[in-house]
Amino acid sequence: MSRLAAVIASRKSEGGGALIGYLPVGYPDLETSIEAAVAMAENGVDAIELGLPYSDPVMDGVVIQKATQAALAGGFRLRHGFEAVAAITARVDRPVLLMTYWNPVVQFGVDRFADELVAAGGAGLITPDLIPDEAADWLATSDRTDLDRVFLAAPSSTDERLKQAVEKSRGFVYAVSTMGITGARADVDSAARGLVARLRTVGATSACVGLGISTPQQVREVLEYADGAIVGSLLVSALATGGVDAVAAAAALLATGKSPARAH
Amino acid sequence: MALRDEVGPYFGEYGGRFVPESLIAALDELDAAYQAAKVDPVFREELATLHKTYTGRPSIITEVPRFAEHAGGARIILKREDLNHTGSHKINNVLGQALIARRLGKTRLIAETGAGQHGVAAATAAALFGMECVVYMGEVDTERQALNVARMRLLGATVIPVKTGSRTLKDAINDALRDWVANVDTTHYLLGTVAGPHPFPVMVRDFHKLIGEEARAQVLELTGALPDAVTACVGGGSNAMGIFHAFLDDPSVKLYGYEAAGDGHLTERHAATITRGRPGVLHGARSYLLQDEDGQTIESHSISAGLDYPGVGPEHAWLADIGRASYLPITDDEAMQALRLLSRTEGIIPAIESAHALAGTIKLGQELGSGATILVNLSGRGDKDMETAGKYFDILDAAALADSDLAEIRPDELGTGASE
């Protein structure tokens, strides 16, 4: 079991589950993005998903698009991603994953990218536009380096494809809560519950739900059936409006959702 | 295996599906529906009838001897896709895809557009089939193409200005993909070129390949022989694949795709994707693209909005690598001079996109000499480009324009024309 999977399993066994927080590297600047990620970890986030800004982020909603676009305009380079991972893992004992669209990895070189990530202390990659069918290079490289690889599973996926996502993923499989893109939603789609149930039947032992989660209540609801809850846009909004302190407060509030609701 | 038999999802190392998992089911459903339709006589008859009674097919060929005098005296024959309904080859693909969408029970069409030609074609198909239509268009393009926005609205479509990224065609595709992920149950994404995830490159090509099939027979009938070369402009590459495909297994026929070189392919302002780009992944497929060292997409530049795209269809990338087709750069100015030349010598005003193919053909004719026959895909007409051309050649009566209603619609910088 990978360290990330172990962290998630350990949170689950404590009666709740894992809280995974997303923030993009380089927003509003490299240093602040590192501070914000550390603040998440110090306020109840169990694993960190660092997004690498990309020019054409088709899976992202407006909040994350704006932040990553600002990071690119501010001079973001891929090496800043490794610098951020190294800086964060030196300060907090949490698994740090990179969330990246596939072309930057291809251009950097899949092997070289993996080696740099290992050297920086990173746990692995979440790849929103790479399906296992197209991932031969990454499957081989992640096996060589023992990096986690998180593929997506969607409500529209066939059972056969869910099985493939579970078998090829390491760390966890990312259950897309709804047919859509990132961004806070009032209701996390009931499709998520059904999707995680389907993932269980094809063997998932570590399934985390993302897209649309923005309140402690939603975190609690998701952790009733999933192993982890992934929050992104809300934390990015907090960073945009209130800086690192607001991220810390938002993370602490979300983390209250990790404990099961108290009986009345 | 014959080159014509390639059906994806890969063309050599290019193509594939680099999209979020949420879209895979929709792509599989589309692929299955397309495979079924392709061999269904009812579907084939429906599409053929539409082309005959609505598009205006077959399009004619026109030999242009006065233009050819400037091209080394080679024999030059134009395939007149400019005469199709809506003014370009784009209608071939939108009618085919709209029929597929209807078979799938989809009631909503979405499309991306650069200057508006594909958006207008998609809106036309939606009107004809009684479907809802939403067109994503970069905010920059809606500003420079206010008249095409009005055309789409008149046809009943909703035009959504895309305000993210570079606010141009590539960002319009991103937003169309985001819409599709969220609304895939009711919605068909009517992609306008031979790019994107499988099955789009092969399906869009197949809907356009009648261009080459008609032209091959027409040229044979006119000249008694195959042409020595076939030329077309290449942005995403749909009109070029459409005319190239019938000739892929005719080794005597050379194929030339002309890319938009903007200010020059050695400057920073161009859209010469195969000439200057390198392989990578964009908009769901592996192909050549314009990108920086980190794999971030670089914005392209061309006077022709329809060629102003930093990617290219994967089949072109493959044809370039195996040497079956050659891809060469044509600057804004070379294209504009060719546009004026065809207008003055033959009374045919081409789209600026197609003028890139004409400019390349002039050079090619001079190279091949008077014994050669060259077939050119005249993919669109230039009506949409009159303001750009008027301004470029300084033949626009600015004072009169300022008094006209037109000026109220477009007081800003004058833009360019149709999607390639």
Image (spheres, rainbow, N blue to C red):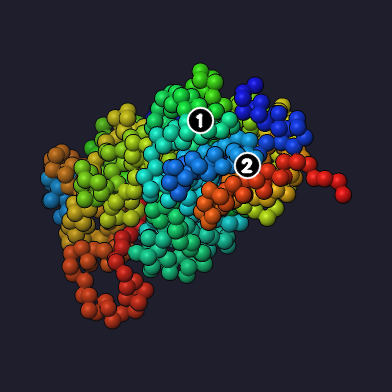
Disc ID at residue B189: none
- In percent of the image, x 28 and y 81: which residue is there? B403
- In percent of the image, x 62 and y 49: which residue is there? A250
Pick whichever, B369 or B385, lies toward us: B385
- In percent of the image, x 23 and y 37: which residue is there? B228
Residues at marks 1 and 2, common chain? yes
User: Can residue B351 be seen in this snapshot?
Assistant: yes
Residue B69 pos. (x, y %): 12, 51
In the rendered image, the residue lying farthest to the bottom is B403
Q: Quadrant of residue A75?
A: top left
- In percent of the image, x 31 and y 63: which residue is there? B415
10 Å crowding of disc 1: few (<14), some (14-19), many (20+): few
Pick whichever, A115 or A189, lies toward us: A115
Pick whichever, A235 or B396, lies toward us: A235
In the picture of the structure, the residue carrying the numbered disc 1 is A90
Q: Quadrant of residue A226?
A: top right
Disc 1/disc 2 C-alpha distance (Å): 17 Å
As drawn, B367 above or below A13: below
Residue B111 pos. (x, y %): 49, 54
Q: Amino acid at mark 2?
A: Asn
* Mark 1 element type: helix
User: Can residue A133 be seen in this snapshot?
Assistant: no
| Among numbered discs 1 and 2, the one appearing first in the sequence | 2
Residue B321 pos. (x, y %): 32, 30
* Mark 2 element type: loop
Disc ID at residue A43: 2
Quadrant placement of the N terminus of chain B: top left
Q: Determine contact: label 1, label 2, CB under 8 Å.
A: no
Q: Amino acid at mark 1?
A: Ala
From the viewer's perspective, tell me whether residue A238 is left or right of residue B237. right
